[in-house]
Amino acid sequence: MSRIASNTFWLMLAQIGGLFIPLIELPVLARALGQQSYGQVLYALGIALTASVFVEFGFNFSAARSLVKIKDQPQQIAQLVTNVLTAKLFLSLVVSVAVALLMFSGVGATAIPSHWLLWISLFILAFGFTPLWYYVGIERLIFPALLDLALRSTGLLLTVILVAAPQHAQRVLTIQATVGIINTLVPTLLMIRKTGLAPVSFFGAKQVLQESWELFLYKGAQSIMGSIASTLLGLLGGARAVGAFVPAEKLVRAASGLAAPVLNAAFPHLVKVQSDSRHAAKKIVGLTLLALAAMTLIFALLTVWLAPWVVNIVFGPGYQDAIELLRILVWIVPLRICSMALAILWFIPIGKERVASRVMMVNIMIICLLAFLLVPSLGGLGMTIAFLSAEITMFVLLMTFFYK
């Protein structure tokens, strides 16, 4: 339990970099870029984040789980590292072609400059090649957490200094892509130095892809949730709709992300517990759900009350539409956190990631379907309804399978 507490602390520190620093950036960018340029940046980042999911391919769970099982076998660890990197190289080539075609085809209601492709590509590589799975698997998270926080803080400082007008939109992408590449490259080189590399095996790469397929569907869909709003709104509603909805959604995502460090740190422990006693593991998960539900419901009520103050403080004038959107979106937090807990602490440790992945795919399909139906006429409110409907469906389905 002390190892879990330690890993939770370091993952929480990294989460500060991943969630709260972007929240600090929000008022800076919203005021400096304006709704139109800010919407373009969010759309470009949405494309990059969505694409990076297909490079990461769920290895943060599948490879970490495999690493837990071969912790004391150096040769197998080296082969696992090599297989994962080989698979990601192949995936990145396919994804790069797809993104280039999307950008140069001119599809969608939001236009972004073609020369942004370089920074979008670097952003994809930075997030897709993250070696976090290795550090989670060996339960040594101090260095990547501190590096992440330091680099993101540096990126925030550069953003405050260098971004002051709508024509500085590209600088945002340049800063974030550069920070992301360094944040991935340094831990990756240290990982390779520690484990070494085995001979490249295309069969081994294919094998890890097959093993990660269900987790890719789950984790990929979960990650796409973070960028799908800006992507769909950019395609269907234009840059202004993105600028109105995404800031409120970012607050909800940040609140939901607070649970991720605890759940990810507990993941290796639950893998071990369920192998000894599935009943004990289920009891732990049940108690965790009760605690999370109580805390998040209180948070949602407070947010509904404080929504006008939060929006005005964080975003400034011109974002009044975000107040009502935030008051609805915040009810996603209890649903999403409890669904995450069920997947990470129960279905994935017991090897039933297929359940979690299929339910998550249903979630994405509901969002896409309702977005196409509602966004053209309702804008951000249509996307809000789509998100809330999908989260309710996912939570109900996961609870049904958990108690079945």
Image (cartoon, rainbow, N blue to C red):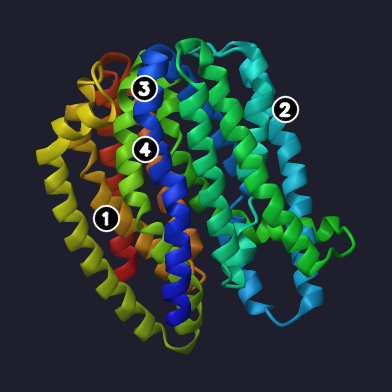
Q: Secondary structure under badge 2?
A: helix
Give the residue at x 42% y 66%.
9
Residue most toward the left? 305
Q: Give how far across and how far down residue 249 sits, in percent.
A: 32, 35
> Label 4: which residue?
23
- How dense is the environment of label 1, judged by Cα within 10 Å: few (below 14), some, or many (20 and up)? some
Is 269 situated left or right of 305 in this image?
A: right
Q: Mark 2 against mark 3, which lies toward the viewer?
A: 3
Element assignment for label 4: helix
Question: Residue 217: x percent and y percent?
Answer: 53, 50
Q: Is residue 338 among what the camera can see?
A: yes
Quadrant where the image shows the N terminus = bottom left
| Residue in the picture at 53% in, 25% down | 172
Q: Residue at x 77, y 59 (%)?
A: 83
On residue 396, the disc is 1
> What is the residue that sits farthest to the bottom in this orientation?
276
Mark 3 crowd level (few <14, some 14–19, many ≥20, 10 Å Cα): many
